Image: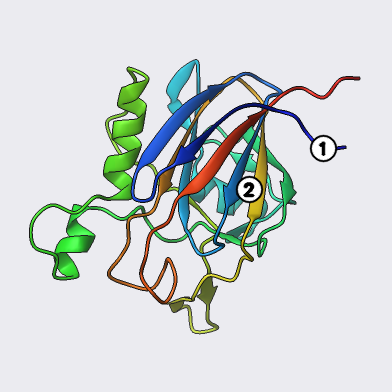
Amino acid sequence: MTSQVADSFVLPASYGKAVRLSAGQQLRVTNPFGTQAVDFWAFSADDLGEYLSMDNFRSFNSMVFVTKETALVSNHRRPLVTIVEDTSAGKHDTLLCACNADIYRQLGVKGYHRSCADNLHEALGELSLSVPFTPAPVNLFMSVHVHGDGTIERLLPTSKPGAYVVLKAEIDVVLAFSCCPQDVTTINGPDRMPRDCLIEILAPVAA
């Protein structure tokens, strides 16, 4: 059965957006070109001090990648959201930090460059919310390989155009997304071009 869309908006290339979801609501993130990395965060709507935690995720699941089978747990080790559908390559990165001003400075960028870290705080600010730090994100659609010697290799994106992930809120949550503005390395494809994605809030399925 095809889910009905209650609301939708474009997640613009290089920018972020935050939304509130009630427990049981679902949201779909679609990657129209398949190449765009999307940084993703989740917070308890009742307490932003409880947030999706990558170190707890790896400890809880004994896994370094987010898949449909892994629990997306908070720093209190309870699930905040669940992946209920995933047509992407199916292994989302948890190891790399959100891009930030210092990364772009080290890459040789002069002056201001948009970043996923800034996008998170801007997006929360649009909801009159704030957090005093930048939690490590889930890097949706991002391809990273861990070699046997422990080194990490950033790969070209492997999701097909139109790939999507459907997230279900397990409690009342605030979700934030950033269409990664990385245009210096090839994390967003060989042409280094950030692109729009699509966010759709799905209507409840009738019983």
Specify the farthest residue to the left. 111
Q: Which callout, 1 or 2, points to the residue nearer the camera?
A: 1
Q: Can residue 78 be seen from the camera position used here? A: no
Question: Eyeballing the image, is 80 above or below 171?
Answer: below
| Colour convention | rainbow
Quarter of the C terminus within the rendering: top right
> According to the image, label 2 marks what residue?
60
Specify the farthest residue to the right. 207
**x then y, percent, for residue 46:** 50, 15
Q: CA distance from mark 1 to mark 2?
A: 32 Å
Quarter of the N terminus within the rendering: top right
> Which corner quadrant of the image does residue 189 belong to?
bottom left
Q: Can residue 200 be seen from the camera position used here? A: yes
> According to the image, label 1 marks what residue?
2
**x then y, percent, for residue 6:** 66, 23
Assign a secondary structure to mark 1. loop
> Which corner quadrant of the image does residue 18 belong to?
top left
Tell me what residue is drawn at x 51 percent, y 38 percent.
52
> Which corner quadrant of the image does residue 141 belong to?
bottom right
**x then y, percent, for residue 93:** 52, 60
Q: Is residue 96 left or right of residue 64?
A: left
* Three-letter amino acid code of the residue under disc 2: Phe
**x then y, percent, for residue 89:** 66, 65
Question: Within 10 angstroms of label 2, few (less than 14), some, or many (20 or more) residues?
Answer: some
Q: Nearer the viewer, residue 11 or 132?
A: 11
